[in-house]
Amino acid sequence: MAHAAPASRAVTRRVGPPDVFSERAHAIARWAWPVTLGLVYGYWAAANVRYGGPITGWNLLFGFVTAIVFAAVYMGIQALAPRLPREVHAVLWGAFTAIAVGFLYSLSGHGHTVLESTILGVVIGAAVFCTLFYRYYTHEDAEGHRIR
């Protein structure tokens, strides 16, 4: 007759899904993701400014400068935000999203006013703030420490 092996008394409990990527993959993703998003954002901004016309050197320069600024700010927030309390962390990402969306909307060139761009950015930023605040609030213990 087969018997089960005795279990140890120590309970190991892993929170969250298993980490299937190596530390090197995570290190590469930390800079590759902002650069990729920056290039997409820069292309989108340059396409909005072009209004369907020909691609010019100034248009390319505008796209690359926009991409570099977006990626730099994204990486700065990515480095700074985890050290902040959950409220400020969520506000920072919400403000970044609001500014990015409002800027793209203002470049779209269909006669949008600054007020319309601001309202759209604030609405999107508020939605991002609410979503991230809920996520950060539900992933912390009572003292405000992140659960990993």
Image (cartoon, rainbow, N blue to C red):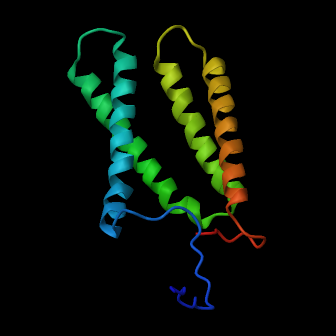
The image shows residue 56 at horizontal and vertical percentages of 22, 18
Q: Nearer the viewer, residue 99 or 123?
A: 123
Number of on-image labels: 0
The image shows residue 107 at horizontal and vertical percentages of 46, 20
The image shows residue 125 at horizontal and vertical percentages of 64, 36
The image shows residue 144 at horizontal and vertical percentages of 72, 69
Left or right, 142 with respect to 120, comes to: right
Image quadrant where residue 75 sits: bottom left
Q: Residue furthest left?
A: 57
Q: Residue furthest front?
A: 1
Rendered residue at 67%/61% (across/down): 139
Image quadrant where residue 7 sits: bottom right
Q: Nearer the viewer, residue 14 or 55?
A: 14
From this view, report whether residue 55 is shown above or below residue 42.
Answer: above
From this view, report whether residue 33 is shown above or below residue 38.
Answer: below
Image quadrant where residue 28 sits: bottom left
In what quadrant of the picture does the C terminus appear? bottom right
Rendered residue at 60%/22% (across/down): 117
Q: Nearer the viewer, residue 8 or 112?
A: 8
From this view, report whether residue 95 is shown above or below residue 13.
Answer: above
Left or right, 145 with respect to 148, comes to: right
Rendered residue at 67%/31% (across/down): 122
Q: Nearer the viewer, residue 132 or 95?
A: 132
Rendered residue at 35%/33% (across/down): 40
Q: Residue furthest right?
A: 142
